[in-house]
Amino acid sequence: MAKDDEGRLSEAEIAVHWKEEAVYRPSTKFVGQANLSDPAVRERFAEKNFPECYREFADLLTWDKYWTQTLDTSKAPFWKWFVGGRLNVSYNCIDRHLGQYRNKAAIVWVSEDENEPDQVLTFQELYVRVNEMAAYLRDFCGLKTGDRVTIHMPMVPELPITMLACARIGVIHSVVFGGFSGEACGTRIHDSQSRILISMDGYYRSGKLLDHKVNADIAVKKAAEEGTKVEKVLVWKRFRDKSASPTPMVEGRDFIVNDGLKAFRGKRVEPVSMPAEAPLFLMYTSGSTGKPKGCQHSTGGYLSYVAGTSKWVQDIHPTDVYWCMADIGWITGHSYIVYGPLALAATTVMYEGVPTFPDPGRPWRIAERLGVNIFHTSPTAIRSLRKVGPDEPAKYNIHFKCMTTVGEPIEPEAWKWYYDNVGKGEAAITDTWWQTETGGFLCTTIPGLDPMKPGSAGPPFLGIYPIIYDEKGQEIPPGAGRAGNICIRNPWPGIFQTIWGDADRFVKNYYAKYNHKPGSTDWHDWPYFAGDGAVWAPDGYLRILGRVDDVINVAGHRLGTKEIESACLTVPEIAEAAVVPVVDAERGRVPEVYVSLKPGVKPEGVAEKVSKAIETVIGKIARPRVVRIVPDMPKTRSGKIMRRVLASISNQMDYGDITTLANPEVVEQIRVQVQGAGPVTHKAGPSDIKEFGKDV
Ligand code: PRX
């Protein structure tokens, strides 16, 4: 299992210890209507048919020009899919549906404020608004094909409208999650070299109207400090008749989009025919260094993959009402709120606010009222809805045919509550494992074909051939009962193309580990290293244990420990900081922060300052559960902080052998500070998984 020289204890090592569960089968009613229930599909996607098997995905789209080569590996591992093909994403998500579905709802938006009416956008209205926005971006902002824009917006219909408008004119969008701080947005503006920032004045969150425009000012300032000048800030209005923000507009720089669009009423913009391999968007994610990586996703490969997975895993038909409760600011929202469902002409529901606001019945009221029949959410949301409103789903007339979970391992108990109470024993569940980098699902059951097994994501998806390696590059076969590093041996259409502006890091992070022939143009030589620990059961189902790198998966969102540590170090009193993942019953993992102070500094108020600094630099999402001020960090003789020891202490685990440390005495001091004066506690619970190569 991957370990760095600072001995970090990874999420996967604080592994889940669940029993193997009995399987559940989808109902005949579900299978009868499923998009995919023919087992022959597995044969069509067998390795011998790779890569041509992926034609089936591309054929879900409308191409301006059909491609000539399915997969070009000549610049491995910079894969090119559907080479020679041309298409436009906004055309595929909107225009081509107008003939049959013009008056069908494309997007139904639900405000957090229950008294505010929904906004329903038919495909016709979406078409009109996307065209007007595309004209505004092109003619007012001077944006052209290949330019980048940063979008820092909450969950409002104007967000997908803006994304689709960019796609219409071949502009690469970089959507930054609305909950990230202005500073985090500024760093991403600089990295992507965006000269336009698109924002919004405000939005509702837990019943409060938040000022969001203020973040745009901070972002522009931060980008300028890093060397990028934002020329225009475009601000959407949350309300038609009033401003949602007290922050003033900057003359000559800031523009209200809603006003500017008036000059473009009724304008139509020809969709720009883009090469299949042109970048569609960037999505920043955290990795093992302090700097977030801009994952670059393609046009043809990405859209084919999200359309295919939406059709065959989420079982979306155009007549379905589909609701994914994620935020569009994350990859799940891009792939499975916007692009996948709209490519299939589904009705996609968007909700502005917090699922438990004003009470835990809210999601079920929305689903009942809108007739949602496909539901998609994260284990964190499931755990929290179960905790605060276990009996709520029963009070509503909701009937889902299928449901998805994504983002973190889901424990069998939470899975069963989801199945019995939310799905009412009728809905097929897919536990989908994938990542920002992978564009779409990698491991999941196909609901019309495979039984479900609580706690396991499932078999690899169509055309995906995984392998589990140990640290030395030896294969751990299915059924070995040992965990290792999960890799995907082959490319697939949804895989990201590169890290924006950092091709070396792309190769190093994701491919170098298990590649033995750096010059090879044969895909077999380039297993994709996912950064997750996994176990492969004899029945072919994969259980994902968590990250093996310096990433913490908090409530299904990735946070880099080094990013959080550098935020801590902006507090002048702090000498050293270490961030570790800690198991949390609701959010999966949460960061805990250890800091030591500079000599002579008084500890009063420092913990609060550290928390505040993390919020400012990253956002509230990274707020640590606790900031612990310690006399010194446990260190190796060469002076490296032993985060593994701190993580063990925080997770109530035995910290193991510390005799080789430079300052072993400090470890016991910290343990007593965190765990109390009793004896060293040990990891609880029986394990059915032999961890990372060793028997436990
Ligand atoms: O550790 C895995 C976990 O989330 C990571 C990817 O995070 P991100 O790029 O933010 O994308 C989240 C949405 C796809 C993975 O490396 N993860 C994702 N899905 C699952 C999961 N862990 C277990 N089970 C899953 N279904």
Image: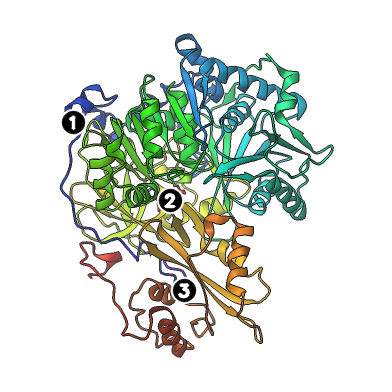
Residue occupying the point 41% across, 84% down: 672
Q: Quick check: 668 left or right of 91?
A: left
Image height check: is 691 above or below 50?
below
Split into 4 quadrants, where in the image is the C terminus? bottom left
- Which residue of the protein is positioned furthest toward the front in this rendering? 115
Q: Amino acid at mark 1?
A: Ser
Q: Secondary structure at mark 1?
A: loop
Q: Quick check: 686 left or right of 623?
A: left
**In the image, which disc is placed on residue 556?**
2
Marks 2 and 1 sit apart, C-alpha to C-alpha, by 29 Å
Image height check: is 504 above or below 258?
below
What percent of the width, then of the height, locates residue 337?
Answer: 46, 33
In contact (CB < 8 Å): disc 2 and disc 1: no
Q: Nearer the viewer, mark 2 or mark 3?
A: 2
In the rendered image, which quarter is residue 134 located in?
Answer: top right
Question: Which of disc 1 and disc 3 is earlier in sequence?
Answer: 1
Q: Secondary structure at mark 3?
A: helix
Within 10 Å of the Cα at label 2, are there few (<14), some (14-19), or many (20+) other Cα atoms?
Answer: some
- Which residue of the protein is positioned furthest toward the top in this rendering? 99
**In the image, which disc is placed on residue 643?**
3
What percent of the width, then of the height, locates residue 142?
Answer: 76, 29
**In the image, which disc is placed on residue 27?**
1
In the rendered image, which quarter is residue 367 located in?
Answer: top left
Residue 246 visible somewhere in the drawing: yes
**In the image, which disc is placed on residue 349?**
none
Quick check: is the Cβ at mark 2 less than 8 Å away from ligand 1?
A: yes
In contact (CB < 8 Å): disc 3 and disc 1: no
Question: Which of disc 1 and disc 2 is earlier in sequence?
Answer: 1
